[in-house]
Amino acid sequence: MSDYKIPKINLTKLAKHSNSWVPLCNEVRHALEEHGYFIALYEDANNKISKEIFDVMEELFDLPIETKRKNTSDIYFYRYKGQLLTAPLHESFGIPHPTDAEALQSFTTLMWPQGNQRFCETMTSYIKVGAEIEQLVDKMVFESYGLPKKHYESHVAATTYLLRPTKYRAAPAGAEDGIGNVGSNIHTDKGFSAVLFQNQINALQIETKSGEWIPIDVPPSAFVFVAGDAYEAWSNGRIYSPRHQVLMKEDKERYTLALFTFNKGITDIPEELVDETHPIQYKPFDNFDLVMYYSTGASPMAYGTAKPYCGINAQ
Ligand SMILES: O=C(O)CCC(=O)C(=O)O
Ligand SMILES: [Fe+2]
């Protein structure tokens, strides 16, 4: 591997008026423009995320298959996925609007009609921290671009969350790399952002702009912030939505909690992000329609959807 350095940014105890705020905003923006992701260290989360988080995930995935399949939705990413031919190690759920206590409760009741208070409380401990990180990062990106406040306010008003608890089984012994050990096939994310929190099993790989695959070594209790296709389009192509995949190399199962954001309504490309060196590249777009476009097979899984869906002069 080249001398590539995984971007790591410490977001701990960031006071908006401290001297480090502006340089750190620039560092966050730079990481997302150059790498499309960064490892977020966020010690404010210490002791906030319940120690039982991966225990309740195990309990969720141990439910009978008929129960798990009750997690349905018209939206592709919002439902249970498992027993996939192309990613046999993968299983995941979609919990829409998890920041809303009632929505989380309704998922919980669907899975455990008798109730499961521990699941709700434990998940909430992650959702709060994940949303805090996502909001902080977005604020930093918008500020770093010097955008008028109204842009950030309308972005916040349009943000919706989706939590995907995901389990990857360990690959069978002797599994071939990229075939038998696939946890997630090569893809880009279709929303604005993903905040990932994993048990201590590494398996995520992210592609650099120059086509190199980097295995992401995530320090314990750190997060990975990944930009998606909607962030790329919104930023007029400045932010990079990296291709990534999950390849299971250790003989232990892996759990990830992925908190995604998708914007509702029409997202405009801020005119401040268009200039001579960055001519307009994307049309205003509907993030959920982009998801629909992708899920009906109009653009291949292994590539970004921003360009084909709302790119100007798309090929
Ligand atoms: O499990 C991970 O680390 C990544 C998951 C992922 O890429 C996704 O759910 O879109
Ligand atoms: Fe992803």
Image (cartoon, rainbow, N blue to C red):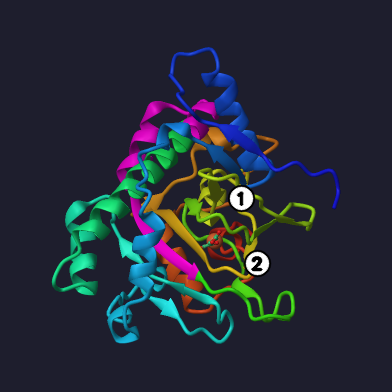
Query: In the visual, does 76 lie left or right of 40?
Result: left
Residue 225 falls inside the magenta stretch: no
Among the two numbered marks 1 and 2 on one chain, the one whose residue lies closer to the N terminus: 2
Q: Which residues are magenta?
A: 140-167
| Residue 222 locus on image (x, y percent) | 53, 43
Q: Is residue 74 above or below residue 159?
A: below
Say which amino acid is labelled 1: Gln
Q: Is residue 133 above or below residue 145?
A: below
Q: Quick one: SS at disc 1? A: loop
Query: In the visual, does 181 lie left or right of 65?
Result: right
| Residue 264 locus on image (x, y percent) | 34, 54
Given residues 201 and 156, the one toward you in this image is 201
Query: Is any atom of residue 107 visible in this view?
Result: yes
Q: Residue at x 57, y 50 (%)?
A: 232
Residue position for label 2: 250
Residue reaching furthest to the left: 114
* Image mark for residue 281: 1
Say which amino acid is labelled 2: Glu
Query: Is any atom of residue 300 visible in this view?
Result: no
Looking at the rendered image, the disc whose residue lies closer to the viewer, 1 or 2, is 2
Given residues 5 and 220, the one toward you in this image is 220
Q: Residue at x 46, y 23 (%)?
A: 14
* Image mark for residue 53: none
Q: How far apart are the alpha carbons under marks 1 and 2?
A: 41 Å
Q: Based on the displayed image, in which of its 4 quarters is residue 79 positioned?
A: bottom left
Q: Based on the displayed image, in which of its 4 quarters is residue 251 positioned?
A: bottom right
Q: Does the closest atom of ligand 1 sit within 8 Å of the Cβ of label 2? A: no
Query: In the visual, does 101 lie left or right of 274?
Result: left
| Residue 148 locus on image (x, y percent) | 43, 26
Residue 156 falls inside the magenta stretch: yes
Q: Quick one: SS at disc 2? A: loop
